[in-house]
Protein backbone atom coordinates (compact mmCIF):
# COMPACT_ATOMS: atom_id res chain seq x y z
CA UNK A 1 0.00 0.00 0.00
CA UNK A 2 1.03 3.60 -0.56
CA UNK A 3 2.46 5.37 2.49
CA UNK A 4 0.37 8.47 3.33
CA UNK A 5 3.46 10.30 4.61
CA UNK A 6 6.64 9.16 2.81
CA UNK A 7 8.91 11.24 5.06
CA UNK A 8 7.51 9.67 8.24
CA UNK A 9 7.65 6.17 6.76
CA UNK A 10 11.26 6.69 5.75
CA UNK A 11 12.10 7.86 9.28
CA UNK A 12 10.38 4.83 10.81
CA UNK A 13 12.20 2.46 8.47
CA UNK A 14 15.50 4.16 9.18
CA UNK A 15 14.85 3.98 12.91
CA UNK A 16 14.20 0.23 12.70
CA UNK A 17 17.42 -0.34 10.78
CA UNK A 18 19.28 1.89 13.20
CA UNK A 19 17.85 0.06 16.21
CA UNK A 20 18.93 -3.31 14.82
CA UNK A 21 22.40 -1.91 14.09
CA UNK A 22 22.75 -0.45 17.57
CA UNK A 23 21.56 -3.67 19.26
CA UNK A 24 23.87 -5.85 17.17
CA UNK A 25 26.86 -3.59 17.75
CA UNK A 26 26.25 -3.48 21.51
CA UNK A 27 26.05 -7.30 21.64
CA UNK A 28 29.33 -7.56 19.73
CA UNK A 29 30.91 -4.91 21.92
CA UNK A 30 29.89 -6.67 25.12
CA UNK A 31 31.24 -9.98 23.81
CA UNK A 32 34.60 -8.38 23.01
CA UNK A 33 34.63 -6.60 26.37
CA UNK A 34 33.98 -9.84 28.26
CA UNK A 35 36.78 -11.45 26.27
CA UNK A 36 39.12 -8.79 27.64
CA UNK A 37 39.51 -6.78 24.44
CA UNK A 38 38.57 -3.36 25.85
CA UNK A 39 40.01 -1.24 23.05
CA UNK A 40 38.15 -3.01 20.25
CA UNK A 41 34.96 -3.17 22.28
CA UNK A 42 33.70 -0.10 20.44
CA UNK A 43 30.73 -0.81 18.18
CA UNK A 44 31.06 0.23 14.56
CA UNK A 45 27.51 1.53 14.46
CA UNK A 46 27.57 3.89 11.52
CA UNK A 47 28.32 1.31 8.84
CA UNK A 48 24.92 -0.30 9.38
CA UNK A 49 22.91 2.87 9.81
CA UNK A 50 20.82 4.58 7.14
CA UNK A 51 22.63 7.11 4.97
CA UNK A 52 20.96 10.06 6.71
CA UNK A 53 22.23 8.85 10.08
CA UNK A 54 25.73 8.12 8.77
CA UNK A 55 26.03 11.60 7.31
CA UNK A 56 25.25 13.18 10.65
CA UNK A 57 27.59 10.85 12.53
CA UNK A 58 30.42 11.43 10.08
CA UNK A 59 30.11 15.20 10.53
CA UNK A 60 28.61 15.91 7.10
CA UNK A 61 25.45 17.69 8.22
CA UNK A 62 24.87 20.87 6.26
CA UNK A 63 27.45 22.99 4.56
CA UNK A 64 29.65 23.67 7.57
CA UNK A 65 29.47 27.41 7.93
CA UNK A 66 31.58 29.75 10.00
CA UNK A 67 33.31 29.30 13.31
CA UNK A 68 30.78 31.22 15.35
CA UNK A 69 33.22 33.90 16.41
CA UNK A 70 35.09 31.65 18.87
CA UNK A 71 38.78 32.10 19.59
CA UNK A 72 41.06 30.16 17.28
CA UNK A 73 44.04 28.09 18.44
CA UNK A 74 47.49 29.48 17.82
CA UNK A 75 50.94 28.02 17.28
CA UNK A 76 51.35 24.42 18.30
CA UNK A 77 47.70 24.21 19.32
CA UNK A 78 46.56 25.04 15.83
CA UNK A 79 48.80 22.37 14.38
CA UNK A 80 47.56 19.86 16.92
CA UNK A 81 43.98 20.66 16.09
CA UNK A 82 44.43 19.77 12.47
CA UNK A 83 46.88 22.04 10.70
CA UNK A 84 46.44 25.69 9.79
CA UNK A 85 45.10 28.35 12.14
CA UNK A 86 41.67 28.31 10.53
CA UNK A 87 41.27 24.56 10.94
CA UNK A 88 37.86 23.36 12.03
CA UNK A 89 38.49 19.61 12.31
CA UNK A 90 40.66 17.29 14.34
CA UNK A 91 40.70 13.55 14.89
CA UNK A 92 39.29 11.78 17.89
CA UNK A 93 42.00 10.01 19.82
CA UNK A 94 39.54 7.21 20.44
CA UNK A 95 39.14 5.95 16.89
CA UNK A 96 40.19 8.58 14.36
CA UNK A 97 36.62 9.79 13.73
CA UNK A 98 36.15 13.35 12.61
CA UNK A 99 35.34 15.94 15.27
CA UNK A 100 33.84 19.18 14.02
CA UNK A 101 34.35 22.61 15.53
CA UNK A 102 32.58 24.47 12.72
CA UNK A 103 28.99 23.67 13.62
CA UNK A 104 26.51 26.42 12.82
CA UNK A 105 23.83 27.19 15.34
CA UNK A 106 21.21 26.20 12.79
CA UNK A 107 22.79 22.78 12.35
CA UNK A 108 22.80 22.12 16.09
CA UNK A 109 19.21 23.36 16.33
CA UNK A 110 18.26 20.85 13.62
CA UNK A 111 19.92 18.03 15.58
CA UNK A 112 18.27 19.17 18.81
CA UNK A 113 14.82 19.28 17.21
CA UNK A 114 14.86 15.76 15.76
CA UNK A 115 12.27 13.22 16.92
CA UNK A 116 13.52 12.00 20.28
CA UNK A 117 13.75 8.30 19.39
CA UNK A 118 15.77 9.04 16.26
CA UNK A 119 17.97 11.43 18.24
CA UNK A 120 18.69 8.83 20.93
CA UNK A 121 19.51 6.12 18.37
CA UNK A 122 21.89 8.40 16.54
CA UNK A 123 23.55 9.54 19.76
CA UNK A 124 23.96 5.90 20.87
CA UNK A 125 25.69 5.14 17.59
CA UNK A 126 28.09 8.06 17.98
CA UNK A 127 28.74 7.11 21.58
CA UNK A 128 29.60 3.55 20.66
CA UNK A 129 32.06 4.74 18.03
CA UNK A 130 34.08 6.68 20.59
CA UNK A 131 33.63 4.94 23.93
CA UNK A 132 32.89 1.58 25.49
CA UNK A 133 29.14 2.07 26.11
CA UNK A 134 29.23 0.08 29.37
CA UNK A 135 31.84 2.31 30.99
CA UNK A 136 30.73 5.23 33.15
CA UNK A 137 33.16 7.37 35.08
CA UNK A 138 32.45 8.09 38.74
CA UNK A 139 33.61 11.50 39.95
CA UNK A 140 33.44 12.99 43.42
CA UNK A 141 32.94 16.72 43.95
CA UNK A 142 34.03 18.34 47.22
CA UNK A 143 33.45 21.94 48.29
CA UNK A 144 36.81 22.88 49.78
CA UNK A 145 35.70 26.47 50.44
CA UNK A 146 31.98 27.06 50.91
CA UNK A 147 30.05 30.35 50.81
CA UNK A 148 31.07 33.99 50.80
CA UNK A 149 31.42 34.24 47.01
CA UNK A 150 31.28 37.84 45.67
CA UNK A 151 29.72 36.74 42.37
CA UNK A 152 25.99 37.22 41.74
CA UNK A 153 24.99 33.98 40.01
CA UNK A 154 21.25 33.94 40.67
CA UNK A 155 21.08 30.13 40.80
CA UNK A 156 23.86 29.74 43.38
CA UNK A 157 23.41 29.49 47.15
CA UNK A 158 27.05 30.40 47.77
CA UNK A 159 26.78 34.05 46.77
CA UNK A 160 27.29 36.49 49.64
CA UNK A 161 24.63 38.70 48.06
CA UNK A 162 21.79 36.54 49.45
CA UNK A 163 23.51 34.59 52.21
CA UNK A 164 21.00 35.94 54.75
CA UNK A 165 18.18 34.47 52.68
CA UNK A 166 19.85 31.08 52.12
CA UNK A 167 21.30 30.84 55.63
CA UNK A 168 24.60 29.62 54.19
CA UNK A 169 27.55 30.88 56.19
CA UNK A 170 30.98 31.43 54.68
CA UNK A 171 33.53 28.82 55.72
CA UNK A 172 37.32 28.80 55.64
CA UNK A 173 39.35 26.83 53.13
CA UNK A 174 39.61 23.20 54.23
CA UNK A 175 42.97 21.92 55.42
CA UNK A 176 45.04 19.60 53.28
CA UNK A 177 44.73 16.50 55.42
CA UNK A 178 40.91 16.71 55.53
CA UNK A 179 40.76 17.03 51.75
CA UNK A 180 43.18 14.13 51.32
CA UNK A 181 41.09 11.89 53.57
CA UNK A 182 37.98 12.73 51.53
CA UNK A 183 39.89 11.84 48.36
CA UNK A 184 40.88 8.48 49.86
CA UNK A 185 37.25 7.77 50.71
CA UNK A 186 36.18 8.74 47.21
CA UNK A 187 38.74 6.41 45.65
CA UNK A 188 37.72 3.55 47.92
CA UNK A 189 34.10 4.04 46.82
CA UNK A 190 35.05 3.73 43.14
CA UNK A 191 35.56 7.33 42.03
CA UNK A 192 38.40 7.82 39.57
CA UNK A 193 38.19 11.63 39.40
CA UNK A 194 38.26 13.99 42.37
CA UNK A 195 36.94 17.51 41.86
CA UNK A 196 37.49 20.40 44.28
CA UNK A 197 35.42 23.57 44.22
CA UNK A 198 36.09 26.88 45.97
CA UNK A 199 33.50 29.67 46.18
CA UNK A 200 35.84 32.35 44.83
CA UNK A 201 35.63 34.87 42.03
CA UNK A 202 39.13 33.58 41.35
CA UNK A 203 42.40 32.89 43.18
CA UNK A 204 43.41 36.54 42.72
CA UNK A 205 40.55 37.48 45.06
CA UNK A 206 42.03 35.58 48.03
CA UNK A 207 45.77 35.99 47.48
CA UNK A 208 48.67 33.60 46.86
CA UNK A 209 48.75 31.78 50.22
CA UNK A 210 45.34 30.14 49.82
CA UNK A 211 46.04 29.34 46.17
CA UNK A 212 49.31 27.67 47.19
CA UNK A 213 47.34 25.48 49.59
CA UNK A 214 45.06 24.42 46.74
CA UNK A 215 48.11 23.55 44.64
CA UNK A 216 49.27 21.27 47.47
CA UNK A 217 45.84 19.59 47.46
CA UNK A 218 46.05 19.04 43.70
CA UNK A 219 49.48 17.42 43.92
CA UNK A 220 48.69 15.17 46.87
CA UNK A 221 45.40 13.90 45.42
CA UNK A 222 47.02 13.40 42.01
CA UNK A 223 49.58 11.20 43.77
CA UNK A 224 46.74 8.76 44.49
CA UNK A 225 46.51 7.96 40.79
CA UNK A 226 43.21 9.83 40.44
CA UNK A 227 42.28 12.41 37.85
CA UNK A 228 42.08 15.80 39.57
CA UNK A 229 39.76 18.67 38.65
CA UNK A 230 39.26 22.06 40.29
CA UNK A 231 36.79 24.91 39.89
CA UNK A 232 38.18 28.10 41.42
CA UNK A 233 36.65 30.85 39.30
CA UNK A 234 38.52 33.03 36.82
CA UNK A 235 42.24 32.36 36.29
CA UNK A 236 45.25 34.28 35.11
CA UNK A 237 47.77 32.74 32.73
CA UNK A 238 50.25 32.23 35.57
CA UNK A 239 47.68 30.55 37.82
CA UNK A 240 46.67 28.13 35.07
CA UNK A 241 50.32 27.23 34.48
CA UNK A 242 50.89 26.60 38.20
CA UNK A 243 47.88 24.30 38.32
CA UNK A 244 49.28 22.35 35.38
CA UNK A 245 52.66 21.91 37.08
CA UNK A 246 50.93 20.81 40.29
CA UNK A 247 49.34 17.94 38.36
CA UNK A 248 45.85 19.21 37.56
CA UNK A 249 44.08 17.02 35.00
CA UNK A 250 41.08 19.21 34.22
CA UNK A 251 39.59 22.61 35.10
CA UNK A 252 35.86 23.21 35.37
CA UNK A 253 34.44 26.55 34.24
CA UNK A 254 30.87 26.27 32.98
CA UNK A 255 29.46 28.65 30.40
CA UNK A 256 26.08 27.96 32.07
CA UNK A 257 23.79 28.95 29.18
CA UNK A 258 23.72 30.80 25.85
CA UNK A 259 25.48 34.15 25.39
CA UNK A 260 22.09 35.83 24.98
CA UNK A 261 20.62 34.51 28.23
CA UNK A 262 23.77 34.89 30.32
CA UNK A 263 23.02 38.46 31.56
CA UNK A 264 19.94 37.02 33.31
CA UNK A 265 22.19 34.58 35.19
CA UNK A 266 24.72 37.03 36.66
CA UNK A 267 25.68 40.69 36.58
CA UNK A 268 29.15 40.37 38.11
CA UNK A 269 30.92 39.09 34.99
CA UNK A 270 30.24 38.60 31.29
CA UNK A 271 30.35 35.69 28.87
CA UNK A 272 33.74 36.63 27.46
CA UNK A 273 35.21 36.36 30.97
CA UNK A 274 34.22 32.69 30.94
CA UNK A 275 35.71 32.10 27.50
CA UNK A 276 38.90 33.91 28.49
CA UNK A 277 39.52 31.54 31.40
CA UNK A 278 38.78 28.52 29.21
CA UNK A 279 41.39 29.80 26.76
CA UNK A 280 44.01 30.18 29.51
CA UNK A 281 43.28 26.67 30.77
CA UNK A 282 43.56 25.23 27.27
CA UNK A 283 46.80 27.14 26.59
CA UNK A 284 48.30 25.72 29.80
CA UNK A 285 47.67 22.19 28.55
CA UNK A 286 44.95 21.39 31.10
CA UNK A 287 41.80 19.56 30.08
CA UNK A 288 38.72 21.78 29.84
CA UNK A 289 35.53 20.83 31.68
CA UNK A 290 32.68 23.11 30.67
CA UNK A 291 28.95 22.66 30.38
CA UNK A 292 25.74 24.29 31.48
CA UNK A 293 22.54 24.30 33.48
CA UNK A 294 19.04 23.74 32.18
CA UNK A 295 15.91 24.84 34.00
CA UNK A 296 16.89 28.47 34.68
CA UNK A 297 13.98 29.84 32.67
CA UNK A 298 15.87 29.68 29.39
CA UNK A 299 14.24 28.77 26.08
CA UNK A 300 15.19 25.59 24.16
CA UNK A 301 17.11 27.85 21.78
CA UNK A 302 19.32 28.91 24.70
CA UNK A 303 20.21 25.29 25.37
CA UNK A 304 21.21 25.02 21.73
CA UNK A 305 23.21 28.25 22.10
CA UNK A 306 25.11 26.82 25.07
CA UNK A 307 25.98 23.65 23.14
CA UNK A 308 26.95 25.72 20.10
CA UNK A 309 29.39 27.74 22.22
CA UNK A 310 31.08 24.57 23.47
CA UNK A 311 31.06 22.77 20.11
CA UNK A 312 32.73 25.72 18.35
CA UNK A 313 35.59 26.23 20.78
CA UNK A 314 39.03 25.66 19.18
CA UNK A 315 38.92 22.20 20.77
CA UNK A 316 35.93 20.53 22.34
CA UNK A 317 35.91 20.33 26.15
CA UNK A 318 37.34 17.12 27.58
CA UNK A 319 34.15 16.83 29.57
CA UNK A 320 30.72 18.47 29.34
CA UNK A 321 28.62 18.46 32.52
CA UNK A 322 24.87 18.83 32.00
CA UNK A 323 23.17 20.14 35.15
CA UNK A 324 19.49 20.46 35.99
CA UNK A 325 18.85 23.46 38.23
CA UNK A 326 18.42 22.54 41.89
CA UNK A 327 16.61 25.61 43.17
CA UNK A 328 17.94 26.41 46.65
CA UNK A 329 15.55 28.37 48.86
CA UNK A 330 16.70 31.94 49.24
CA UNK A 331 18.33 32.26 45.81
CA UNK A 332 16.70 34.61 43.28
CA UNK A 333 15.89 31.77 40.87
CA UNK A 334 14.14 29.78 43.60
CA UNK A 335 11.67 32.63 44.01
CA UNK A 336 10.75 32.68 40.33
CA UNK A 337 8.76 29.43 40.41
CA UNK A 338 10.68 27.98 37.49
CA UNK A 339 9.48 24.72 35.96
CA UNK A 340 11.90 21.82 36.42
CA UNK A 341 12.90 20.25 33.08
CA UNK A 342 11.56 16.76 32.45
CA UNK A 343 13.88 13.78 32.23
CA UNK A 344 13.27 13.64 28.48
CA UNK A 345 14.37 17.26 28.12
CA UNK A 346 17.62 16.28 29.85
CA UNK A 347 17.98 13.26 27.54
CA UNK A 348 17.56 15.55 24.52
CA UNK A 349 20.38 17.80 25.74
CA UNK A 350 22.64 14.82 26.47
CA UNK A 351 22.01 13.26 23.06
CA UNK A 352 22.66 16.52 21.22
CA UNK A 353 25.86 17.09 23.18
CA UNK A 354 27.02 13.58 22.30
CA UNK A 355 26.39 14.04 18.58
CA UNK A 356 28.05 17.45 18.23
CA UNK A 357 30.93 16.65 20.64
CA UNK A 358 31.47 12.94 19.97
CA UNK A 359 34.78 12.46 21.78
CA UNK A 360 33.94 14.45 24.93
CA UNK A 361 32.84 12.95 28.23
CA UNK A 362 29.22 13.93 28.91
CA UNK A 363 28.52 14.10 32.63
CA UNK A 364 25.19 13.82 34.46
CA UNK A 365 25.62 16.39 37.21
CA UNK A 366 23.27 18.32 39.50
CA UNK A 367 19.67 17.14 39.57
CA UNK A 368 20.47 13.46 38.96
CA UNK A 369 18.99 12.53 42.34
CA UNK A 370 15.49 13.11 40.93
CA UNK A 371 15.94 10.56 38.12
CA UNK A 372 14.84 6.92 38.20
CA UNK A 373 17.15 4.12 37.05
CA UNK A 374 15.19 3.96 33.79
CA UNK A 375 15.59 7.69 33.17
CA UNK A 376 19.31 7.51 33.88
CA UNK A 377 19.52 4.49 31.58
CA UNK A 378 18.08 6.63 28.77
CA UNK A 379 20.73 9.25 29.48
CA UNK A 380 23.50 6.64 29.29
CA UNK A 381 22.05 5.25 26.07
CA UNK A 382 21.99 8.81 24.67
CA UNK A 383 25.69 9.24 25.39
CA UNK A 384 26.23 10.22 29.02
CA UNK A 385 29.26 8.40 30.39
CA UNK A 386 30.12 10.13 33.65
CA UNK A 387 28.33 10.90 36.90
CA UNK A 388 29.03 12.72 40.12
CA UNK A 389 28.98 10.24 43.00
CA UNK A 390 28.44 11.05 46.68
CA UNK A 391 25.49 12.37 48.64
CA UNK A 392 26.31 16.08 48.17
CA UNK A 393 27.34 18.27 45.23
CA UNK A 394 28.87 21.41 46.76
CA UNK A 395 25.70 22.53 48.61
CA UNK A 396 22.96 20.48 46.92
CA UNK A 397 21.81 16.86 47.46
CA UNK A 398 22.96 14.00 45.22
CA UNK A 399 22.50 10.25 44.83
CA UNK A 400 23.88 8.11 47.64
CA UNK A 401 26.88 5.88 46.86
CA UNK A 402 25.03 2.64 47.70
CA UNK A 403 22.18 3.56 45.36
CA UNK A 404 24.63 4.14 42.51
CA UNK A 405 26.18 0.74 43.14
CA UNK A 406 22.75 -0.86 42.78
CA UNK A 407 22.13 1.08 39.57
CA UNK A 408 25.45 0.02 38.07
CA UNK A 409 24.61 -3.61 38.80
CA UNK A 410 21.07 -3.31 37.46
CA UNK A 411 22.20 -1.68 34.20
CA UNK A 412 25.34 -3.75 33.72
CA UNK A 413 27.63 -0.71 33.92
CA UNK A 414 31.30 -0.78 34.86
CA UNK A 415 33.46 2.02 36.27
CA UNK A 416 35.59 3.80 33.69
CA UNK A 417 39.21 3.80 34.92
CA UNK A 418 41.20 6.98 35.47
CA UNK A 419 43.17 8.14 32.43
CA UNK A 420 41.52 5.39 30.34
CA UNK A 421 43.54 2.85 32.29
CA UNK A 422 46.89 4.24 31.11
CA UNK A 423 47.74 5.72 34.55
CA UNK A 424 50.59 8.03 33.52
CA UNK A 425 53.42 8.40 36.01
CA UNK A 426 53.26 11.40 38.29
CA UNK A 427 55.82 12.65 40.75
CA UNK A 428 54.85 15.40 43.16
CA UNK A 429 56.87 18.51 42.22
CA UNK A 430 59.67 19.33 44.64
CA UNK A 431 58.15 22.71 45.49
CA UNK A 432 54.84 21.12 46.39
CA UNK A 433 56.55 18.32 48.34
CA UNK A 434 58.39 20.87 50.45
CA UNK A 435 55.22 22.90 50.97
CA UNK A 436 53.28 19.85 52.12
CA UNK A 437 56.04 18.84 54.52
CA UNK A 438 56.23 22.37 55.90
CA UNK A 439 52.52 22.11 56.65
CA UNK A 440 53.43 19.26 58.98
CA UNK A 441 51.95 16.51 56.82
CA UNK A 442 53.81 13.39 55.92
CA UNK A 443 53.13 11.98 52.46
CA UNK A 444 51.90 8.40 52.66
CA UNK A 445 53.08 5.98 49.97
CA UNK A 446 50.38 5.05 47.50
CA UNK A 447 49.95 3.05 44.32
CA UNK A 448 53.10 1.28 43.16
CA UNK A 449 55.09 2.77 46.07
CA UNK A 450 52.68 1.27 48.58
CA UNK A 451 52.88 -2.13 46.90
CA UNK A 452 56.69 -2.00 46.97
CA UNK A 453 56.62 -1.02 50.66
CA UNK A 454 54.53 -4.04 51.50
Image (cartoon, helix red, strand yellow):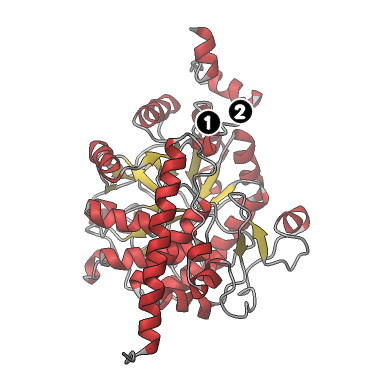
For this view, does 377 lie left or right of residue 372? right
Residue for point 35% across, 77% down: 12
Q: Visible in this render: residue 281?
A: yes
Q: Which residue is mark 2?
A: 426
Q: 61 and 448: which one is in front?
A: 61
- The percent position of residue 295, horizontal first and vertical second, equals 31, 67
Q: Does any portion of residue 194 appear in the rendered image?
A: no
Residue plotted at (49% across, 47% down): 232
Query: Percent position (x, y) of residue 82?
Result: 72, 60
Of labels 2 and 1, earlier in sequence is 1
Mark 2–mark 1 contact, CB under 8 Å? yes
What is the residue that sits farthest to the top in this orientation? 454
| Residue drawn at x 50%, y 44% as measured from the top left | 206
Disc 1 element: helix
* Quarter of the image where one finds residue 298: bottom left
Place residue 263 in its image quadrant.
bottom left
240 and 445: which is toward the camera: 445
Disc 1 marks which residue?
Answer: 222
Question: Against 167, is 154 above or below?
Answer: below
Q: Give the Cα separation between the discs numbered 2 and 1.
A: 8 Å
Q: Residue 302 location in percent, x, y?
A: 42, 74
Amino acid sequence: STCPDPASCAMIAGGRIGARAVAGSIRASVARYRAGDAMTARPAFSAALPVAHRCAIDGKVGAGGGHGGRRQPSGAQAAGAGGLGGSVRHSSAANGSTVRTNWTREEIQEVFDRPLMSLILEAAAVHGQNFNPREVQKSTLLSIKTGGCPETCTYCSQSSSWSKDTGLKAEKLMDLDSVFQMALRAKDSGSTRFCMGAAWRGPSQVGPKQFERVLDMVSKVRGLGMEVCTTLGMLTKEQAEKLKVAGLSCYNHNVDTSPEYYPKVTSSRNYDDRLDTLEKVRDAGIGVCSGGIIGMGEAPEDRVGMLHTLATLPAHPESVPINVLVAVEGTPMASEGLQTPTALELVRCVATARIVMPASMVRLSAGRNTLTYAEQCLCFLAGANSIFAGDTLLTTPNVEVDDDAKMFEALGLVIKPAFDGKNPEFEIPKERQESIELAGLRLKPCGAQAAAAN
